[in-house]
Each structure stands twice: as structure tokens, then as C-alpha cells.
Image (spheres, grey):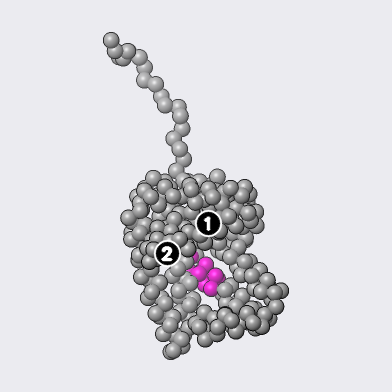
């Protein structure tokens, strides 16, 4: 006999639906997470990649193709001039594309499918701040290279284009000079690591994004060290099978970047 009562009033579902991640609010200050969060960033982001693996791989292939084109353009400027200009354009383009991929990662976390259009989503309303971020990031990297070359005597451009050998550089450098170089580049990484998601996902002004990014890294040193160690391991493993593993590792990296941003900066 059925328990259905046609005269019983309907019952409302009082359980609130989960809030879409796109509506999460930016914290006034980044939170501090335990060391284990460095693993959680990876484990929590894998389902985002696995559920849209084919599209992630396609986007990664397009990124690799653009990287080849940019690399060719940069190599030509070594012969014909305009090297710094092309590097700045490359910095702007990579920042805008990264912003688009992060928009895609947020969409996936919100239960939406990843689309090829997400790769170019940074060219929308966030184009100006992302382009400005690319210019400032390029300026920071050039400033550090100038300081390294002026104070320590390391020609980073020569090291990058192969005109200076690493053995030539290391043979004349004291340990404290190497430590200074590491500190300088570590500062740039801390200033820049979370800037793209802050700008494109929560409309944070560029200069404020640098400050918040630095605070976020400063408050989570152990978690981010663990995260970076896992990243290096995955990059090495991904490069072994004819670099094909990178077609999965790179998307996972982007997804983990979004998850780490969400867990540190959003509520």
C-alpha cells in the first residue's frame, strides 16, 4: 500500500544549495594554511582536469604552439633587434592567456564544461588590467636581471640565449652572491604568483594584487614549498614519455593554481 497522501501539503526543501564558486568573496587578507595544503592543492584539482581532460589537452597543445611561435620570434630579434619589445609582448600575451585559462578553471569548478573559448577569455573585459599586469611583470623581471648583472656580474640575457655558459658564470661567483640571486628571484615569484587570478577573477587592481600575492605567499611558505616540490616532480615525470605527460601536467598545474588561490584568498 502506498504511503502517498494527496492531501498532504508540499514540503519545502530548506537545505540551501551550494554557493557557486564564481560568487565566492575575496577575503580582506589571505588566510594561512597548514603544510598539508600543498598536497591538497593538487589532490583537490585533479577532478577538474579529469572531467574535461580532452579539452584541457587541446588547450595545452594550442599553448605549446603559441610558445613555439613566440620562441621563433624571440630568436629572430636576436638577429634583427627588438628583443626587449618582443619579450614584453610575450609577457603580455602569456598573462592574458593565463587569465583566460583561470576563468575556465573557475567555470569547471562551478560545474560548467571547459571550452576552447576560455583560452581567449582574457581578451574580454579584463584585457586592459591583464595587459598592464604583463607589462609590470616584465618590468620587474628586467629590473631583477639588471640588478643581478650590475651588482653580481651575471649576464642573464647571455645565459638565456646561450652566448654565456653556466660554467663560466658559476666559476666566479661566491656562495653569498648565489644566495642573493635566489632571494631576488624568490621575491619576484612571491609578488607575482597570485596576481593573475586576483586581477582576472576578483577585479583587484594590479598594484594591490602584487601586495596581496606577496602576503599570500608570505603566510603560506611551507604549503607553497610542498606544492612547488610536487610541481617539479610532476614536470620531471611528465617530460619522460616524449614530453607527452606534460599535456596532462600543465592543465593540472593551472587547475591547482586556481584551487590554491581559492583556498587562500576566497571565502
Disc 1 is placed on an element classified as helix
Q: Label 2 neighbourhood size at 10 Å, few (<14), some (14-19), many (20+)?
A: few
Label pair 2/1, CB-CB below 8 angstroms: no
Nearer the observer, disc 2 or disc 1? 2
Disc 2 is placed on an element classified as loop
Viewer-proximal residue, 207 or 161?
161
Q: Is residue 132 above or below residue 263?
A: below
Q: Residue at (52%, 61%) from the top-left corner?
A: 232
Q: Can residue 212 be seen?
A: no
Count of numbered tags: 2
Was residue 134 drawn as part of the magenta stretch in this picture? yes
Residue 26: % across, % down: 55, 50
Q: Quadrant of the N terminus?
A: top left
Residues drawn in magenta: 130-138
Was residue 181 drawn as part of the magenta stretch in this picture? no
| Residue 204 position by quadrant | bottom right
Reading the image, the residue beneath label 1 is: 230
Q: Can residue 160 be seen?
A: yes
Residue 106: % across, % down: 44, 51
Q: Residue at (36%, 17%) from the top-left corner?
A: 9
Reading the image, the residue beneath label 2 is: 240
Judged left or right of residue 110, residue 134 is right
Amino acid at each position: 500500500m502506498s504511503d502517498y497522501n494527496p492531501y498532504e501539503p508540499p514540503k519545502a526543501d530548506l537545505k540551501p544549495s551550494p554557493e557557486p564558486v564564481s560568487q565566492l568573496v575575496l577575503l580582506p587578507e589571505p588566510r594561512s594554511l597548514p603544510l598539508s595544503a600543498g598536497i591538497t592543492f593538487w589532490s583537490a584539482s585533479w577532478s577538474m582536469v579529469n572531467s574535461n581532460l580532452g579539452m584541457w589537452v587541446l588547450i595545452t597543445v594550442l599553448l605549446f604552439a603559441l610558445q613555439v611561435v613566440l620562441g621563433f620570434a624571440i630568436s629572430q630579434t636576436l638577429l634583427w633587434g627588438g628583443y626587449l619589445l618582443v619579450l614584453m609582448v610575450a609577457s603580455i600575451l602569456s598573462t592574458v592567456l593565463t587569465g583566460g585559462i583561470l576563468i575556465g578553471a573557475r567555470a569547471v569548478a562551478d560545474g560548467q564544461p571547459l571550452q576552447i573559448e576560455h583560452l581567449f577569455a582574457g581578451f574580454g573585459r579584463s584585457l586592459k588590467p591583464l595587459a598592464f599586469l604583463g607589462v609590470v611583470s616584465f618590468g620587474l623581471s628586467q629590473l631583477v636581471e639588471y640588478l643581478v648583472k650590475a651588482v653580481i656580474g651575471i649576464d642573464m640575457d647571455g645565459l638565456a640565449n646561450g652566448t654565456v655558459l653556466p660554467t663560466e658564470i658559476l666559476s666566479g661567483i661566491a656562495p653569498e652572491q648565489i644566495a642573493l640571486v635566489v632571494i631576488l628571484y624568490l621575491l619576484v615569484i612571491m609578488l607575482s604568483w597570485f596576481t593573475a587570478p586576483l586581477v582576472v577573477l576578483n577585479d583587484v587592481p594590479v598594484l594591490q594584487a602584487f601586495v596581496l600575492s606577496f602576503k599570500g605567499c608570505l603566510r603560506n611558505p611551507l604549503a607553497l614549498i610542498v606544492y612547488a616540490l610536487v610541481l617539479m616532480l610532476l614536470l620531471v615525470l611528465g617530460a619522460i614519455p616524449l614530453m607527452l605527460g606534460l599535456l596532462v601536467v600543465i592543465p593540472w598545474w593551472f587547475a591547482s593554481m586556481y584551487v590554491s588561490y581559492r583556498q587562500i584568498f576566497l571565502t
